[in-house]
Amino acid sequence: MSLRSWYWTALAVLMTVGTAVRIPQLSNTLNEFHSFRQTQTAFAIRGFARDGIDLLNSPMPIFGRDSSVPMEFPLFQAIAALLVPLGLDAGEAARTVALFSFQVSAILLALVALRWHGRAVSLIAIGLFEFSPFGLFWGAASLIEFLAVALALGMVLGFMAWLDRRSIPGLVLGSISAVLAFLIKVTTAPTWVVMMLAAIVLASQSEGVRRIWRRALIGLAAGPGLGLVAALVWARHADSVKLANPLSAEWASSRIVGWNLGTLSQRADPAVWGVLVDRVSFLIVGPAMIGVVLALLALLFAHDSRTRWQIAAWLATGVSAPLVFLNLYWVHEYYLAAVYPALVALTAIGIVWVSRAVPAATWRRNVLAAGAALFVLMLCVGSGTGTERVKWSRAGVPEQDPAKVASIASETRPDDLVVMAGCGMDPTLLYLADRQGLSFTSTAQVSEMWQIENIDDYRYLFRCDVSQPGDAYLPSGYRTEPVTGELYHILPTSE
């Protein structure tokens, strides 16, 4: 078997096994880790499947009957909704599309790594991508993350093909991928533009600036340039929908800038950075950031500037988004999906660099590199956090408060609307109970909202915030009467 055939066979085996081990995860409940975001995604899928696909809206009926809360452009949700008529529920459909997106990301990562670093780095990167604790748990979660990653990598590959070979298909496909990537996850796509800038530097070294600058400008304009314009247009539309409802208005883009970026005090807090370092270390690159440390050594001791630029590009891609969107990455573990390919590529580069320093035949070096990658994986899996994520990927996460879901589902009728007191943006309970409702963050929103909504349409109230009486979330003239647990009937005070 030729080296080329061996490479593609090995890649196919890694991805096939990686897919097989995730198949049981497709039927896991969404009542798990970060359930709020997973059920947000699935709510829109369920709405599209029942009422038809409308890409200008994102059904999430937690702010009134049939309310829409457009966050990202709902392409992922629309694709998943097409699978529901085949017999999948919304959660299974979401996980299926997520797994497909994860494996498309793997293929595109393999191609970028192969293009820049060769077969050994490419295969080891995919081995880490498929089997690290982070990838095992989040690779088939009900999230849009890896569709955005796949499109961002498609943007990079298309740009490289255009820049190096004047490939018109590369330019077109790269441009389409960029527009969709920016629309689906505007916090993911920009970090991968770093790879495009590095490609420009490398092309200018080999061909000269005068020969490539026009191609570079055209590629940047057709890719991230159009993508940014599309993202701004979508944000304007999404904000207009969210601002029309007092409960969703707080999620308008202009009001969550601070939430996305984080604060100066967070940036000065070692504990915040400690959380990020622990996640990267124990879920992806190995304890003590060993993968990144090896890549930094490879960067420092590389013999040519081309290799240094390539490693620096992966490094900058891996750290830029967490540095900018610190709070998002601190609060949400799954946000690391945006830079996950860069982190495993860095680890693969470091491992192969060490193996090539050993005086031995090429095949022995490759075996050593594969063994080192397996050792890094074992270190991650053996850590407390890594062990937990691997266990969750196989057995599922213990359900959170299943009794609450059961009480809503059993005590209310399918067409009943439920006031969710102090539940905020979390749609988990309403999604799992398959109900619609009105979800308040605090009592400060009550007066304005009941000028819009008719209290007589709501028969039940559920208290997420047990520090406040349920009556505090109702207009004057109405009271609550216990049904079971935190669930109450809403009644006029006269009764």
Image: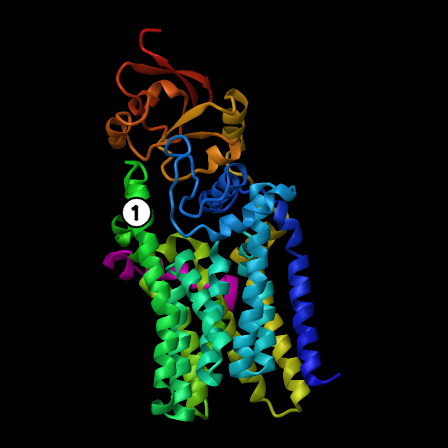
Question: Would residue 191 be seen by someone viewing this image from the given angle?
Answer: yes
Work out which residue is located at the far front of the displayed protein and give it. Answer: 168
Q: Relative to 208, is 200 above or below?
A: above
Mark 1 neighbour class, 10 Å CA radius: few under 14, some 14 to 19, many 20 or more: many
In percent of the image, x 37 and y 60: which residue is there?
Answer: 187
Quadrant of the image containing the C terminus: top left
Residue for badge 1: 239
Question: Would residue 278 be seen by someone viewing this image from the given angle?
Answer: no
Tell me where residue 55 appears, x and y as whole percent.
Answer: 44, 48
Of residues 396 and 162, the one nearer the viewer is 162
Of helix, strand and loop, which mostly describes the magenta segment? helix
Q: Is residue 362 left or right of residue 110?
A: right
Q: Is residue 300 left or right of residue 379?
A: left
Of residues 401 and 52, the one nearer the viewer is 52
Query: Which stretch is magenta?
Result: 262-285
Q: Relative to 148, is 402 above or below?
A: above
Tell me where residue 470 appears, x and y as whole percent.
Answer: 34, 22
In percent of the image, x 37 and y 80: which residue is there?
Answer: 216
Quadrant of the image containing the N terminus: bottom right
In percent of the image, x 28 and y 14: which residue is there?
Answer: 477
Residue 458 found in image quarter: top left
Of residues 316 and 238, the one nearer the viewer is 238
Magenta-drawn stretch contains 200:
no
Tell me where residue 199 appears, x and y as whole percent.
Answer: 42, 81
Tell me where residue 295 appears, x and y as whole percent.
Answer: 47, 79
Q: Is residue 452 left or right of residue 287?
A: left
Q: Which amino acid, mark 1? A: Asp
> How was the colour assigned to the protein in this rendering?
rainbow
Work out which residue is located at the far top of the displayed protein and give it. Answer: 495
What kind of element bears circle 1? helix
